[in-house]
Amino acid sequence: MMRLRGWPGWGKHRGHGNPREMTPAATNGGGEPPAPPVAAELAAESGPPVEFVATGTGAPLAAVRSVVAGSFTVASGDVREVRRTYLDTFDARLRAAGLTLYAQDERLWLARRDGTGEVLSEEQAQDASEPLYASALGGGRLSAALAPIVARRAVLQVAGVALAAQSLRLLDGLAKTVVRLELESPEGLPARLRLRPLRGYEREQRQFAALLLRSSQFAAGSEPLVDAAVRAAGGEVAGITPAVNVPMSPDEPAQLALARVLTALTAVCDANLPGTRAALDNEFLHDFRVSLRRTRAVVRELHGVLPAAAVPELRAELRWLQVQTGPVRDLDVYVETFDDLPALLPAELRGELGPLGDLLAERRRDAREQMLTALDSERTRQLWQRWRELLSGLAELPLDDRPDALTPAGILCGRRIRKLHRRMVTMGKAIEPGSEPAAYHELRKQGKELRYLLELFGRSLFGEELVGPLVSALKGLQNVLGLHQDRVVQSEMLFEAAPAVAARAPGIGSQLAMGALMGRFETEAAEARGQFRERFAEFASPSQRRIVREAFPK
Amino acid sequence: MSGGPRAKVLATYNIKGGVGKTSTAVNLAYVAAEQGASVLLCDLDPQAASTYLFRVRPNVKGGGRGLLRLRRAAGEAIKATDYERLDLLPADFSYRHLDLALGDFKKPAARLKKVLAPLRHEYDYIILDCAPSISLVSESVFAAANALLVPVVPARLSARVYDQLSELAQHGRVGDRKIQIFAFFSMVSTAKPLHLDTMARIREHAGIEILGVGIPEADEIELMGERRNPVGVYAPESQAAVSYRALWSEVLGRLDGHSGPSR
């Protein structure tokens, strides 16, 4: 079987390739292109590999020959036709981690995106057209490398390229190889030439790089092939994440900033729907719901920009959609974390959770069916249609029932941020150790709205330097409130599920186990309440309040 | 990376010249790299035959003294060969005075080991191609090596072979550490009754262990100088190439603490 190694280098020692590829002409190409070169790298004594992109229209091999004529002779290996499929999570976690994963020649290759292009792992591939999961890749190096990065996210195809790969060598006067090159000519994209490190021949490599850059036929590569392939396929190079970063100006009319933010949030919702429907992994639904919740927060907090007559129904419909997707998300989390539960129990009860697990899995299946029915319903279709019409035509709508439409975004958002912060301070002060869980939950909901405003508008309007520390203090508080709410809800879920579990498992073991878990969750909720005061004090400290007062307008 | 040494250091050694040391070093280095190990071949012979075979210019900055004296000299002098995972520390004409250069140091015998120490983290095997002699350089090689690969030409008087090997066994003891000595028949011509007879007599000698695999006298090996490549490149199916692969396999099997390259 033909085996290609992208950037031969199995370990720390560069230039290590396929054991079978020992003859010079057989060394091979195919791998993640390195980071774009910079002048400093070219000048370095022993820099990382450098990638060049053909800019001319002629055959790239002929171009190389003409560029090096008089300095080196070119020896070329066989041309290999290669089909390469790039893989990543929907939110491009591997890319963010500086890695590239691809399937080629029935193998999976994990390589660095950086200048070394080092292949970290390669193994026999499963069918890469199906979603891959780190947990299902066995216990090898690839699984170990991927698991901490992709967690439970599905690894999906993000782009495919058909390319002709060819190894080239530049020879000196003794016919000694002094430069190794990999030439890749992807269909529909410019050819790429990658300079591979060759110990002891750095001077020749620099000489060659300089010759290339001086020629009009190659330019320093500006983006890795994977990014070019994703872009060419119409994909988002950086993946789809719920993070929305919309540039805006404090003095622009609020309606313009708001329309852009809501449009971006809607795009995230849209993008996550197919994965949600197909249940590729739980994060699609999660990211859909986060974006929907952010949308609702913006509508609620900045409702004066939208037509007053439309807002109540809009809010009701968006809430309805959130509710339709809520049970599945809750059950996703329960099922996902179910395996952690036995460790919380005394040894004799650890085997008693099977009936609860079965019940949760069954409920999840039912909830998914209901959710899919709702997502595909006429009601949902109409909601999105009206929503899109509203956003695209917002600036043209009458202003008489939209008092905040033309208010400068900085004024309007700053005012809301200030007000929300003050409200949270008031609510938090009223919370005492004996307060009902609902009081903590209400504060948490306000905290989410504040955080959304800070992240969606605050960062862009007031700058990271100001908003960053506020978000950080808020996160500390929200973590405690989130943990508290999770434990309260989990405990309530167990109490509610107890009769159904009892009907399935007549013995007392499951009930005892669930009771023990409830006790554990209630204890953890109490501990979270115990931490509340300290975290709230950080959030509502005089210095933080002063910053809010001074930075955000009344 | 662990702090301790990793690469096994093997040296081709014989007091006599013309017994196949360089061709053994070059071909075993190639075979090891072909099989997936990372290999450094150090050409310590001022005649620079290994260096020539890999088309590398025999030039080490600072020469033999620089190599021994400067901390990074060896690493900086290394050249990649045309083959994946196989690097070369070239020879330099000044190595003819390596004995004198070693004499400058307080512990000359330990110097080469010190020079190689950082490189042992980078490779699975370091193969030393040594000049034919018994000298301070030899002492230094014994101190650095885990094992000696000793080509024995069966045409030579067998009594001389016994002397050489027992002498080596004495020289090869460094403190409490005993260097493994892998003697093997080189330049064997099975068509010559003298070779067969000599080989049989040496193998019967109780005090001497000779590896099972021998390297034939072959045109393909002699062609190395013309082709400037290991035999496995231009005649991979030849008896010579097959013998080198078998020899490497036997050496690996007998090497103390060998667990194969970490692949």
Image (cartoon, grey):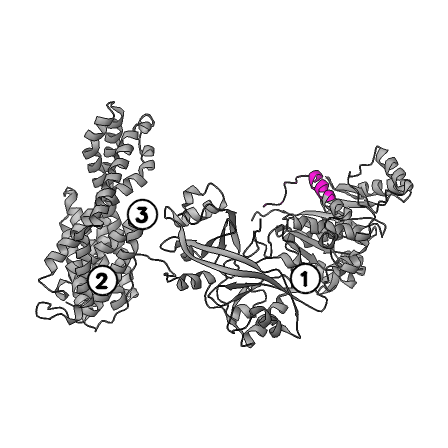
Say what secondary structure mark 1 lies in: helix
Horizontal relation, residue A185 to residue A94: left or right: right
Query: Hey, what amino acid is under mark 1?
Result: Ala
Say what secondary structure mark 3 lies in: helix
Q: Chain of mark 1?
A: B
Residue A296 visible in image: no
Question: What residue range appears in magenta?
Answer: B246-263
Asked if the magenta segment contains residue B262, the reply would be yes
Residue A463: x percent and y percent?
A: 28, 67
User: Along the polypeptide, which appears first: circle 3 or circle 2?
Assistant: 2
Q: Is the Cβ of the residue at disc 3 closer than 8 Å to that at disc 2?
A: no
Residue A18: x percent and y percent?
A: 60, 52
Horizontal relation, residue A429 to residue B221: left or right: left
Q: Which residue is the site of mark 1?
A: B77
Asked where in the image residue A133 lies, by quadrant, the reply is top left
Q: Chain of mark 2?
A: A
Residue A502: x percent and y percent?
A: 22, 27
Query: Hey, what amino acid is under mark 3?
Result: Ala
Residue A318 visible in image: yes
For label 2, count other residues whose C-alpha is less than 10 Å away and answer few (under 14), some (14-19) or many (20+).
many
Asked where in the image residue A96 lies, by quadrant, the reply is bottom left
Q: Which residue is the site of mark 2?
A: A262
For label 3, count other residues whose C-alpha is less than 10 Å away and answer few (under 14), some (14-19) or many (20+).
few
Query: Hey, what amino acid is under mark 2?
Result: Leu
Q: Which residue is the site of mark 3?
A: A278
For label 1, count other residues whose C-alpha is less than 10 Å away and answer few (under 14), some (14-19) or many (20+).
some
Residue at (78% x, 63% y) in the render: B94
Say what secondary structure mark 2 lies in: helix
Front position among marks 2 and 1 = 2
Front position among marks 3 and 2 = 3
Q: Is residue A402 above or below residue A508?
A: below
Q: Is residue A215 above or below residue A153?
A: below
